[in-house]
């Protein structure tokens, strides 16, 4: 089962799953970091920003933020990325992202946190 796995461990678990959709997703992500020409932190922050813009689901955040944590990207850099993109994507997308991130990591957001 893939639940509870983050980062590279989560990708490896998906790759081992007998599911063509997951296999396709894993294949799509192979070597994208190397081909991007970006440093690891910038690459992951760009992916997180894209997830916000696309109104991604909690598992997408779990994988990418989990990987960012594994490689030492400070939480403040992720928060700064959300602040930087808010005027472009809108507050509704950032709030939706905060909820999905909270859900991904088992955190509860109160109405005061919105």
Image (tube, helix red, strand yellow):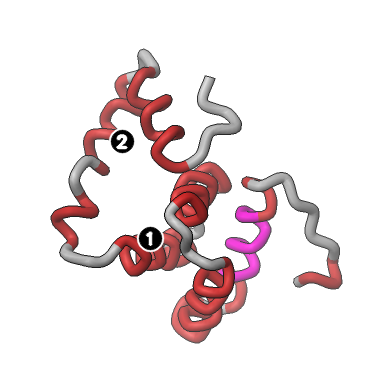
Residue at 51%, 55% (x, y): give it.
69
Q: Main secondary structure of the magenta part?
A: helix
- Please state if 17 lies on the left or on the right of 58 as rendered: left
- Please state if 54 lies on the left or on the right of 29 as rendered: right
Q: Nearer the viewer, residue 38 or 24?
A: 38
Dot 2 corresponds to which residue? 25
Q: Which mark is residue 75?
A: none
Residue at 60%, 32% (x, y): give it.
4
Image coordinates of residue 61 in percent, x first then y, are: 52, 51
- Please state if 96 lies on the left or on the right of 82 as rendered: right
Residue at 57%, 74% (x, y): give it.
76
Residue 80's place in the image compared with 99, above or below, is: below
Q: CA distance from mark 2 to mark 1?
A: 17 Å
- Image: magenta residue range: 94-101
Image coordinates of residue 88 in percent, x first then y, are: 45, 82
Q: Which mark is residue 44?
A: 1
Give the quadrant of residue 36. bottom left
Quarter holding the C terminus is bottom right
| Badge 2 element | helix
Image coordinates of residue 103 in percent, x first then y, are: 68, 48
């Amino acid at each position: 089962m893939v639940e509870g796995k983050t980062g590279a461990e989560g990708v490896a678990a998906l790759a081992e799953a007998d599911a063509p959709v997951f296999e396709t997703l894993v294949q799509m992500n192979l070597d994208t970091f190397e081909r991007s020409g970006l440093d690891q932190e910038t690459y992951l922050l760009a992916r997180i920003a894209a997830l916000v813009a696309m109104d991604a689901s909690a598992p997408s955040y779990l994988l990418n933020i989990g990987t960012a944590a594994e490689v030492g990207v400070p939480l403040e850099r992720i928060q700064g990325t959300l602040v930087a993109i808010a005027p472009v994507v809108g507050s509704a997308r950032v709030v939706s992202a905060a909820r999905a991130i909270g859900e991904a990591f088992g955190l509860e957001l109160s109405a005061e946190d919105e």
